[in-house]
Image (tube, rainbow, N blue to C red):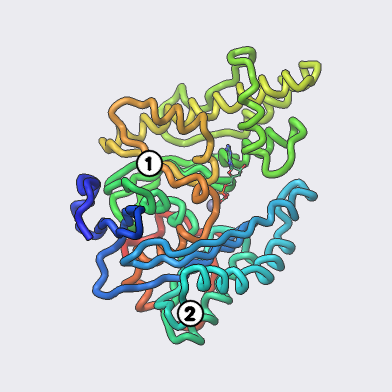
Amino acid sequence: METPNCTKYLPESKQLNHFIYKKGHNTHVYSQYSLGKKMRVLGIESSCDETGIAIYDTEKGLLAHRLFSQIAMHAEYGGVVPELASRDHIRKTLPLIEEVLSEAGLSRSDIDGIAYTAGPGLAGALLVGAAIGRSLAWALNIPALAINHMEGHLLSPLLETPSPAFPFVSLLVSGGHTLLVDVKGVGQYELLGESIDDAVGEAFDKTAKLLGMDYPGGPYLAAKAEQGIADRFVFPRPMTNRPGLDFSFSGLKTFAMNTWLDTKQTEQDKADIALAFQTAVVETLAIKCKRALKQTGHKRLVVAGGVSANKALRHKLDSMKGVEVFYPRQAFCSDNGAMIAFAGAMRHEAMKHQDVPSFTVRPRWPLNELSPP
Ligand code: KG4
Ligand code: ZN
């Protein structure tokens, strides 16, 4: 074990420790909370259409993670069907828990705590993860902790190396949220701006749908945009010509619809519209990120959520001068269990006081209602 060269990213609050864990020829750098004792946290994510399970070890880092995506099941209906989602989480959660335990070479009794997503998300889907997480914790006589899904996304880049030190600005771009947050530490979140209508992912999905693409259309639209001719169409950059950090994306899909109806609707037209839409979204997000960084004085930007997988967005943000930008790895941009297990580990102290066997979920749960662990 030795101190890695990423020490400069350490937060002053010394809450976050980094060390190198050597295994064979590979050197893994893990970020972790300094704990009085070693803790292995089982994370359960079931807020929408993905069942994600992972085990995070506060000494060794992420031990195992598994994901089952329900996308193929919902694609037939053009969007998530909540009742089908809940039923599928019931089918998948326990088998995936067995798989991660086996991959990590652990048994249930090796788990010290359980972290589950308690909101925001679909009520029925959340209840599955909460009921299984709480019951398992009760049976194993270990604590369980309700985790905010958006906090999971927000902290997910801290699983990477180098990981960002606090404070930073976080841009959270998912299917349900578009948030700019001033992050001073775990649980110290000040909302700077949000979408007043469609979330970015939702705008991608709706625009992709009207162009005839499958659900969820974000990745399909992004792929199509790669064949587009730049500047053939120019879409507006909503709410950038007035002060403030809020977003509005619903007008872009209407703009896309009207543009599409004015063309011969060829594959090239589709690609050109996809590119114009994506460029408008990316530039709008970049303008607001710059403003948020200027307003807060922070030099680090952390981007997470499903849309943070978008290559054009990463390219644009990476080109900003004087700013370090951090992302989760591609597999952890969209929903996953690792970010929930990690958030649970970051809140391990709170976990000790959360062993009441009753529970509730919060389909709506604003990030700024959280407090530090
Ligand atoms: O974070 P996430 O998996 O789920 C929510 O918590 O909402 O985000 C899913 C969203 C979907 O709207 C999906 O279309 C979008 O992320 N997305 C993308 C890309 N990959 C996923 N949008 C644009 N470009 C991508 N490459
Ligand atoms: Zn999500």
| Residue 176 at least partly seen | yes
Q: Which residue is mark 2?
A: 107
Cα distance, mark 1 to mark 2? 34 Å
- Ligand 2 within 8 angstroms of badge 2 C-beta: no
Answer with the quarter of the image where residue 92 lies. Answer: bottom right
**Label 2: element kind:** loop
Q: Earlier in the sequence, mark 1 or mark 2?
A: 2
Q: Which residue is mark 1?
A: 326
Relative to 159, say whether 325 is above or below: above
Q: Residue at x 27, y 48 (%)?
A: 165
Instruction: Please name whichever residue, 77 or 91, is drawn nearer the observer in this view of the structure.
Output: 91
Which mark is on residue 309? Answer: none
Q: Nearer the viewer, mark 1 or mark 2?
A: 2
Quadrant of the image for the C terminus?
bottom left
**Label 1: element kind:** strand
Give residue 267's position: percent from left, percent from top: 76, 22
